[in-house]
Amino acid sequence: MTTALYRRYRPEAFGEMIGQSQVTEPLMTALRGDRVGHAYLFSGPRGCGKTTSARILARCLNCAEGPTDTPCGSCESCVELGRGGGGSLDVVEIDAASHNGVDDARDLRERAVFAPARDRFKIFILDEAHMVTPQGFNALLKLVEEPPDHVKFIFATTEPEKVIGTIRSRTHHYPFRLVPPAAMLSYVEELCASEGVRVETGVLPLVVRAGGGSPRDTLSLLDQLIAGSDVADGGVLVRYERAVALLGYTHGELLDDVVHALGARDAAAAFGAVDRVVQTGQDPRRFVDDLLERLRDLIIIAATGEGAAAVLRGVSDEELQNYTRQAEAFGASRLSRTADVVIAALDEMTGATSPRLQLELMVARVLTAADGPVPAPAEGPVAPAAAAPVPSAAPVAAPNAEESQGASPASPVDMHSDPASGPEPEPEPEPSPPSGPLTTEVVREHWDAVLARLEGISRSSWLIVLGARVAEFTGDVLTLAFTSNADIAKFKQRTAGAGPSEDLRQAIVAVLGVRVKYLANLDDDGSGPGGGPGGPAPSPPAPGPTATPAGRAPHGSPRSEAGTAPAAAAPVTDWAVAPIPRDVPSAPREGPAVGSSPGASLGQFAVDDDPEDARAAVRTETLTPAREGDVLPREDTAPTPDDDRDEDPELDTDVRASDAPVPPVVAPRLSAPEPRAASRPSGRDGVQRYGEAVVRQVLGATFVREEPYEAPTRFS
């Protein structure tokens, strides 16, 4: 029967401690200067030497040649407190986990009164001191604060924060730390050499890694491997395969296969290695942890090159060459991205019900990861920020059709052209803020660029501001003239600090470099962006029945005889833009003469922005009561250019019955809406109908009859 390694190699002096110089050197200095305190608090992770250091301190204090920083090892006190000693009567070790109450504290106080039996000091070592209850600490408080001259206290704990502050403030606190891997690796190599144990390459790094920096845990694992290894050639040989199987780590060959497969993007080999991990019963989380450790080594090699041997201690030259080839297959940037994917998968596997699925998904993500950012598709919508700014000012009417047909073919924007059919146009340079003072003329000159920038910021805000013109710019106040009160109301709307006005302000800052304030007025002098006195006036819409909703000319641009829009006034979209009538007429007018176009009187009514609503608003409708199967006649108004006729001749007999022209109905004035309401009598059922003419005009529908609504049931 043998003694455990951590007991056989327990240090007996501060000079034998490894990795705890922050504790041993101050204590040795205090011992040499005879400045020893009455109470000490040793804290740190488990197995890092707290209790061992407490025993060494007791040996140094009670040594026959002491107090000294190096015990002699031959006196009775040193022998009794050594590795094979049975303990000293004057050094009391108390397990605070089982002696943590008030009664135990009272017993300790009674024992502390008596002088030491033989040695210089009576020393109390309280292991696991954090287990003492607050009542027990309070019972010890007076004794710890003012102990007798022959009493010393040493508290050892892994959780110093649980020691009450009144006790902790009366002690000298020394924090212990985990031993670094390099120091631990050198220590276990020396230990194996002294024990006559041979180990294969790669065994000791696994032992140090499994020990986690704790000397006691590391020696326990090494002791287990030595005990389970066979005797070969007159000595114990610890094999790598047995160490891997016992410690639960992934075999190096399997890691090499996985890394080579991922580096070469060989999906078959990668998923085959994953299947081997599962079939051998290995924990998928441990495999991912080992893979992450290997990727860390490869990243270090890719970053440091030949200097990696100084960082990766315990790795042979042959393994370093293998790691170097793997790092070159990946590349530094791809190694970093792969490590990010692996560490994310490691986090997701915590508590996962299907670790194998998570592992396979991780391998798939690593295999499909590209070396760089994924390029954007050639087709599809382009983000406004990435697209080149397109001037979107209101088109100006061409003088005649010949000029329109003779315009440059490159000026209109063809919205139906294939972007892949030819080279893309080069993006226009970003406009620079104008130099010199900003005047109204300067703002008007740059207004097209402002609208282009606004279109990239917000399409809806651009549609609202498109019909406005710059009236005046004074100081930092910009006066805009809108064509309708509806546009002014929409321009002033703000939601959570954003809205059309703020979007336009951002566009002005980007183009003109100035932050403005607004005055929004109704336009009485002109319309259109950039317009104003002295500017080109928009042409009136061409009258006649040839204009249809699908072929309406843009605002201010009459269609040419050839049926195509002028090249200089080509819109940026396929939308048909119609002139918007004003909300408030400058002066009341009489109704149009007989035979005149009904659209000529639209400007005197307050209508919405939709021209269809404008036409429907000037009509009156009288509906007769409907009977079962009756068909109501259409409105008795003169045909307008946008009237939709039913294709069924039976439904239009009332309209075509007379060839004589029917004069248009004169719409009531805006200031007298009461006669308009009275012109819509209710039917026999007492239902007052409003807006049916608008619905039929927009949808091209004909009212037939009303039917009662029956709610559907589960059996209908």
Image (spheres, grey):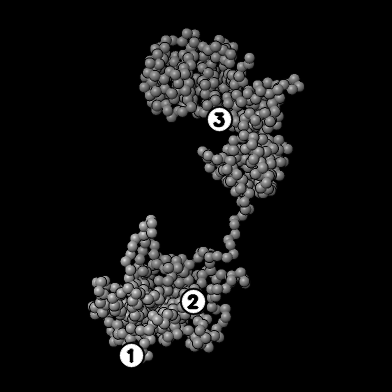
Q: Nearer the viewer, residue 360 or 715?
A: 715
From the viewer's perspective, tell me whether residue 597 is left or right of residue 368: left
Query: Which label was assigned to residue 594?
Result: 1
Q: For mark 1, does the 10 Å Cα neighbourhood hold few (<14), some (14 to 19), or many (20 or more) residues?
A: some
Q: Position of residue 389 (x, y in %)?
A: 51, 70
Q: Secondary structure at mark 3?
A: loop
Mark 1 or mark 3, whichever is nearer to me: 1
Q: Earlier in the sequence, mark 2 or mark 1?
A: 2
- Farthest residue toward the right? 233
Residue shown at the point (70%, 31%) measured from the top left: 201
Categorize mark 2 by other alpha carbons within 10 Å: few (<14), some (14-19), many (20+).
many
Q: Earlier in the sequence, mark 1 or mark 3?
A: 3
Q: Which residue is mark 2?
A: 571
Tally of marks = 3
Instruction: Give the position of the N terminus as an image quadrant.
Output: top right
Pick the quarter of the image with the C terminus.
Answer: bottom left
Mark 3 lies on residue: 178
Q: CA distance from mark 2 to mark 3?
A: 73 Å
Q: What amino acid type should be assigned to the residue bearing mark 2?
A: Pro
Q: CA distance from mark 1 to mark 3?
A: 103 Å
Residue 281 at x, y = what percent?
62, 34
